[in-house]
Image (spheres, rainbow, N blue to C red):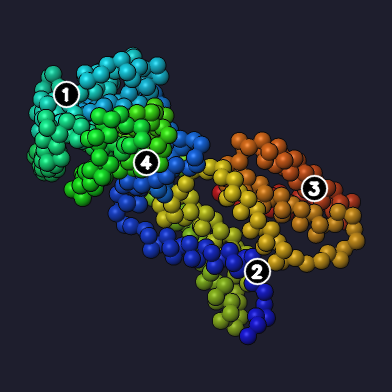
Amino acid sequence: MMLKERVTVTTAAVAVLAVATLYALARFSGSSRVHNHCQALQRSGWWVDNSSLVWQPQGCTQRQYAYDDVVRCMKSPRTTSVGQYALFIGDSTVRDKFFAWARLVDVDVDGDAKVHSDITVRWPGEAGIAALFVWDPYLKGEVAQQVLHGAYNETLEQPRLVLLGAGAWHLRYANESGGIVNWRRTMDGVVQRLAESRRDGAAPIADHVYLSPVAPVVPDKLSPERLATLDPAAITWMNAYMQAAELPVFSSWTDMARARPLETTDGLHYSAGLERAAVNLLLNRVCNRDTIDPHPPMRTTCCFEYPAPGSFVRWYTAATLTALALLVAHSRWATIPRIVPSAATLRQLLVFGGILLIMFVCDRTPLFEKLHKHYIAWVFTAMLALATVGGAATWSADKSEAFLGRAQTDEWKGWMQIVILAYHAMNASGVSGIYNPVRVLVAMYLFMTGYGHCCFFYAKRDYGLQRLTAVLLRTNVLAIAL
């Protein structure tokens, strides 16, 4: 049977919104550890494209940390630790993370200056704030054991953050270290100590304790000695073991390295840019609750608890639901009290209120996942192509013979809005071939808006306050309400 009514763009948009909402509700978790995307920050994500080192965590937007942000984080009044420093313990791959952290203080820190030794970097002018690296590739040293048992003293204060990492040397020097068997015993010991530290009255290790995964290798770039011992299958098993043991491991670092084999020259250690992106994830995990402004706009949503809706939002929701109830009552009441607006007015109020509530749910609640805006050429092209198909499907002839009639200018302005929305959604301002034409479109839009008002005044001779108020309200009400 043929449909008598053509499916409009509005109907299609409502259907897509309904499906997206149901899908988001199915995926939503009541656990704050899940819906605030702290777990996703550690476990999953992807590189935005093949040409840049821009990492997109699964479902949230991260903050790019700088010197002042780290200082504010380390000085947070919420911390329960004694010391205002980060402690890195492990092998050379952990040392790479330490240097990425240290370069927040001094971008010229030489990552090759000290090998197989302890290193300390202090924040200039900030007493107590520092980053320490302890060379201990087997996690059997005195400092590692002291930290794991929470046995702090005047020489070693409790740190704000502890990052542990081992595994590569267990494979590289299996005869000396005991290989994977001994590594597994070490990880089991870490699991036990972390469990004990969470018990009431136990000595805490630090505010935050995380493990670095065993860095994946690129066999084609390894030296013959490393190639003979650093087995990719063994590394995969070790990382899977840590995840199965529910250790707080940054598995996303493994994905970052695997997807960027060109970022390593020796097959084991990765570039400073990749390590900087990895450490930025760590900083988001540790510091976001101390550095993020909880008021809108929420530019950072990883490890972020959205504030509860304010009284205005609750009042507005109640008003929208009231409009819906009155609209239903219109179809049931024989007589409508004069104080109740007409059905047409209620319908318009309901649509406007519904749009604002949808925007609120999308932007200021954790129901829908958030992504950074990045320009991807094929996605931008696909968005415009879909809009073109929708326009062709709803084509109709304009019988007006006026020069630049309203229907024609509205059509042009509509296409301009589509292009401008796609431009902003994809953050295409960095592409000059798109930026410059869009600037022209904005100027054309303003001209046609002014042209339309000029034609109206010339034809209708209506310069009254009602017309002025209607134009100002129509132009600004949505921006003010948002």
In this rendering, which labeled residue sits more in front, label 4 or label 2? 4
For residue 456, side relative to residue 77 (left or right): right
Which residue is under mark 3?
448
Say if residue 6 shows up in the picture.
yes
Locate residue 214, reporting x and y percent.
Answer: 26, 37
Depicted 122 relative to depicted 359: above or below:
above
Crowd class of label 1 (few under 14; some 14 to 19; many from 20; radius 10 Å): some
- Left or right: residue 259 versus residue 78 is right
Q: Residues within 10 Å of mark 3 (few under 14, many from 20)?
A: some
Quarter-wise, where is residue 164 in the image? top left
Q: Amino acid at mark 3?
A: Met
Tag 3 and tag 2, C-beta contact below 8 Å:
no
What's the amino acid at mark 1? Glu
Q: Is residue 418 above or below residue 113?
A: below
Is residue 239 visible in the rendered image? The answer is no
Q: How many marks?
A: 4
Disc 3 versus disc 2: distance between alpha carbons?
26 Å
Task: Indicate whether 116 appears above or below 438.
Answer: above
Q: Residue at x 52, y 43 (%)?
A: 373
Residue linked to disc 1: 157
Secondary structure found at label 2: loop
Secondary structure under the numbered disc 3 in the rendered image? helix
Q: Residues within 10 Å of mark 4 (few under 14, many from 20)?
A: some
Residue identifier under label 2 = 8
